[in-house]
Amino acid sequence: MKNLFVGNLDFKVVEDDLRELFGQYGQIDQVTLMRDHDTGRSRGFAFVEMANTNDGDKALTELDGAQYAGRTLRVNEARPRVERGGNRNPFDPRDYRRRSA
């Protein structure tokens, strides 16, 4: 199995478009198009899980930098998701949330 990150997508691209594009290289297990929580609008990137590692490698090689829907695709091997902790340091200057006085 090969999990790919697909970036720089046109906001009009839907999951079926990605299934068709990546399906040319092998069996697709899952396509997840990332959407904004509030608006439901595409965030311009997706994850494509391919059943076969070799097929995924070929798709990555051939589609990274390719033109699709007027944009230059960025295709990389997806990195494992890092869990975010719920315990934030209230004194961390990177914490952009408003602090109660």
Image (cartoon, rainbow, N blue to C red):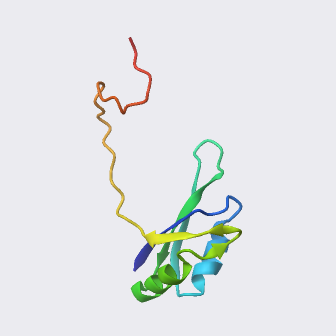
Give above or below for 97 relative to 86: above
In percent of the image, x 57 and y 80: which residue is there? 22
Q: Position of residue 27 (x, y in %)?
A: 52, 85
Position of residue 19 in the picture relative to residue 80 (left or right): right
Q: Position of residue 50 (x, y in %)?
A: 47, 79
- The N terminus: image quadrant: bottom left
Give above or below for 41 relative to 94: below
Position of residue 14 in the picture relative to residue 34 (left or right): right
Q: Position of residue 99 (x, y in %)?
A: 40, 19
Q: Position of residue 98 (x, y in %)?
A: 44, 22
In percent of the image, x 48 and y 82: which residue is there? 61
- The C terminus: image quadrant: top left
In percent of the image, x 60 and y 76: which residue is there? 66
Instruction: Report if residue 47 is visible in the image.
Output: yes
Q: Quadrant of residue 21?
A: bottom right
Position of residue 61 in the picture relative to residue 16 (left or right): left
Q: How many marks?
A: 0
Give above or below for 4 relative to 11: below
